[in-house]
Amino acid sequence: MIDKKFIGLRLPVFHATAEAEQLRFFAKATGETRAEYVDEAAAHAAGHPGLPLPPTFLFSLELKAPSTAWRDEMGIVPSRILHGEQGFTYHRMAYAGESLKFETRIADIYDKKGGALDFVVRETRVSNPAGEHVADLRSVLVHRNV
């Protein structure tokens, strides 16, 4: 079982940038049809300074975290990980080319099924280069213990 002493652990802060081509690919892959997510001119016409990040794209950027040492420290075995859930609370738009800051902490750890499954809840604050609060991300990692 994953030790609850890790609740409150702050993971290394990192920065990630969404490139325009990544956003176009993501929009197409998720069926986003609004032109402002794939066309710079349409984005400008809609009042955006550049291509906005499509909904849920921040989850993709969060996967770019350079350090996974925290998982080793907690005893998490990558082959036993399942994606439990994810949630987003948006505060402002983010755009292609912005270096976004990701600050993550372990918010909770709990188990189910008599300890067969551990759940690790991560909360991440995302801010833009001006320090403005872009979004809060919440994700739940499920670790199979048997």
Image (spheres, helix red, strand yellow):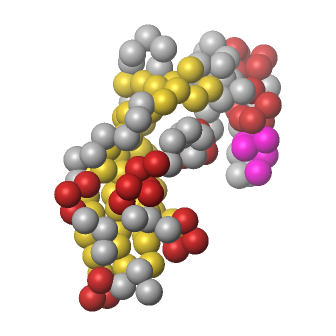
Residue at image point 42% right, 24% down: 127
Please state the horizontal and vertical placement of residue 118, each as a whole percent of the image. Answer: 34, 73
Apparent side of residue 23 relative to residue 90 in the rendered image (left or right): right
Residue furthest to the left? 5
Please indicate whether residue 5 sits to the left or right of residue 91 in the image.
Answer: left
Picture quadrant where residue 13 is located: top left
Q: Residue at x 31, y 68 (%)?
A: 2
Magenta stretch in the rendered image = 25-29
Relative depth, front residue between 102 and 22: 102
Q: In this view of the protein, can residue 16 be seen by the observer?
A: yes
Give the total number of marks visible in the rendering: 0
| Any part of residue 92 in sight | no
Work out whether 80 lies above or below 105.
below
In the picture, the quarter occupied by the C terminus is bottom left
28 magenta-colored: yes
Tell me which residue sits at (75%, 35%) in the image.
22
Inspect the magenta stretch and tell me whether residue 107 lies in it: no
Place of residue 30 in the rendered image (x, y in percent of width and height, measured from the top left): 71, 52
Residue at x 20% of width, y 57% of height: 5
Q: Quadrant of residue 11?
A: top left
- Picture quadrant of residue 95: top right
Residue 7 drawn at (x, y percent): 23, 54
* Of the pair 133 and 70, the residue shown nearer to us: 70
